[in-house]
Amino acid sequence: MKIALLGYGKMGKEIERIALERNHEILMRIDSFEDWNEHIYDFLKVDVAIEFSTPATVLDNIMKCFSANVPVVVGTTSWYSQLDTVRELCIEKNQTLFYAINFSVGVNIFFQINKKLAQLMNSHSEYEVYMEEIHHAQKLDAPSGTAITLADDIISTLNRKENWINNLDESGDVLGIKSVRESNVPGTHIITYESANDMIEIKHTAKNRLGFAIGAMLAAEFIAGKKGIYEMKDMLF
């Protein structure tokens, strides 16, 4: 496949390495408005775009993909308030969009484990539940998008929780989340159920960015020749 990398930071470079190992071609790398001016005609030759840019540029990049009839895999987050509009436009223009909060295969399996555990704990009100997420110091959003997805899945399943807050001291009908920022931590998420007698804990730890890059590359291969809107569950389960 001929691939456009929209965003050429750490994730873009990791995806490039994986793509080349899988015998794909990187046709263009976009990391600025000037890059678009230089490569705009090359974009018409692209088979798929992989988007890991910034919240300020992601929507414009998605629109460029739709206009050029280029399927797009989107890993940038913090744009989901516009998701309904983007979905409608994707369907209206018969385009292809694959989006995910987290492209790690392991994290998406962890999502399913989290839902199942919440179902099992729903009838055991003696257990308090809380969460912790740890990321590198450069990550500005807190809690992480992955943590919010985990929290939302707990709230939708566990009757005794109505919402979440980024404060571990909260309890009652509020799910507390502690956000920690440390150097060189790709991402760790911990969910704990604790009673007076014992503790149940599930944890996912990313060792590096490779798992995210592989997942994004698998998504790009998955949507080849397809139309419509896809998520990790469509590819994995």
Image (tube, rainbow, N blue to C red):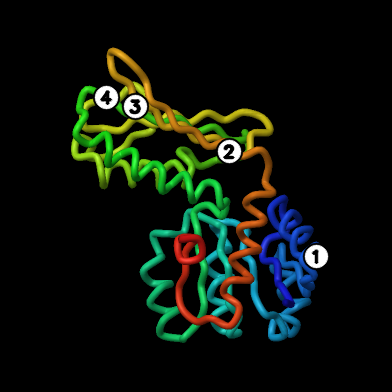
Q: Residue at x 55, y 40 (%)?
A: 140
Give how far across and how far down residue 152 sits, in percent.
Answer: 33, 46
Amino acid beneath label 2:
Gly
Q: CA distance from mark 1 to mark 4?
A: 48 Å
Vertical comparison of 57 with 66: above or below: above
Q: Residue at x 61, y 78 (%)?
A: 224
Say which residue label 3 marks: 193
Give how far across and how far down residue 220 sits, in percent.
Answer: 62, 69
Q: Residue at x 41, y 48 (%)?
A: 112
Amino acid beneath label 4:
Tyr
Residue pushed farthest top? 197
Say which residue label 1 marks: 20
Q: Residue at x 75, y 67 (%)?
A: 29
Say which residue label 2 marks: 187
Amino acid beneath label 1:
Leu
Q: Nearer the viewer, residue 150 or 119?
A: 119
Say which residue label 4 marks: 127
- Using residue 68 as the reference point, say whether residue 34 is left or right of it: right
- Using residue 41 as the reference point, say whether residue 126 is left or right of it: left
- Quadrant occupied by the N terminus: bottom right
Q: Secondary structure at mark 1?
A: helix
Vertical comparison of 84 with 18: above or below: below
N-terminal-most mark, 2 or 3? 2
Q: CA distance from mark 2 to mark 3?
A: 20 Å
